[in-house]
Image (cartoon, rainbow, N blue to C red):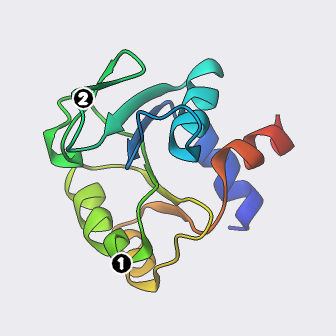
């Protein structure tokens, strides 16, 4: 499956856990998440140092989220991506998206072996604008 088809399949899903979402509105993790929220996606902030971000309950890790997560959108440094991929697999996520600059072959292998759709080193907001 080519990259555009993978991205279209990802955008057909609705629940996005945003790992590393910042409470600061000028940070990409915040404004990308809020852009997706404004486009009808359900955003679930994941940040262990926050209780709420943008009026949404924030969870310390993917494992703490009580609802089904479709997409795990990662705004963390590349060295954390593999452990996040393991959590994404364990919660039954369907897709994993590593934002610009987040690159991990190990995360790719973990996610793809478990059957997750996978996008790496790309921006969800930019891709959504291009396609829709």
Element at label 2: loop
Q: Is residue 9 visible?
A: yes
Question: Disc 2 designates what residue?
Answer: 67
- Answer yes or no: do the residues labelled 1 and 2 have beta carbons within 8 Å? no
Distance from Cα at disc 1 to Cα at disc 2: 26 Å
Q: Is residue 14 above or below residue 102?
A: above
Please state if 117 lies on the left or on the right of 121 as rendered. Answer: left
Name the residue beneath numbered marker 1.
79
Quarter of the image where the C terminus is located: top right
Q: Is residue 40 visible?
A: no
33 left or right of 87 in image: right
Residue 58, which numbered label? none
Tell me what residue is drawn at x 60 percent, y 30 percent.
36
Q: Residue at x 44, y 29 (%)?
A: 43
Number of residues whose C-alpha sits closer than 10 Å to that of mark 2, classed few (under 14), some (14–19) or many (20 or more):
few
Q: Position of residue 72 (x, y in %)?
A: 41, 49
> In the image, what residue occupies the spot 66% across and 62% down?
122
Q: Where, by quadrant of the figure, is residue 110 drawn?
A: bottom left
Identify the image quadrant of residue 107: bottom left
Sequence-wise, which precedes: disc 1 or disc 2? Answer: 2
Of residues 30 and 3, the one drawn nearer to the viewer in this rendering? 30
């Amino acid at each position: 499956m080519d990259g555009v088809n993978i991205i279209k399949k990802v955008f057909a899903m609705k629940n996005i856990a945003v790992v590393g979402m910042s409470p600061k509105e000028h940070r990409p993790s915040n404004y990308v998440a809020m852009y997706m929220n404004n486009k009808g996606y359900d955003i679930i902030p994941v940040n262990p140092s926050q209780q709420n971000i943008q009026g949404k309950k924030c969870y310390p890790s993917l494992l703490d989220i009580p609802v089904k997560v479709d997409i795990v959108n990662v705004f963390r440094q590349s060295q954390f991506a593999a452990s996040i991929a393991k959590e994404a697999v364990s919660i039954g996520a369907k897709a994993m998206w590593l934002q610009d600059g987040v690159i991990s072959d190990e995360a790719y292998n973990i996610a793809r072996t478990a059957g997750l759709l996978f996008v790496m080193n790309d921006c969800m907001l930019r891709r959504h604008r291009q396609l829709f």
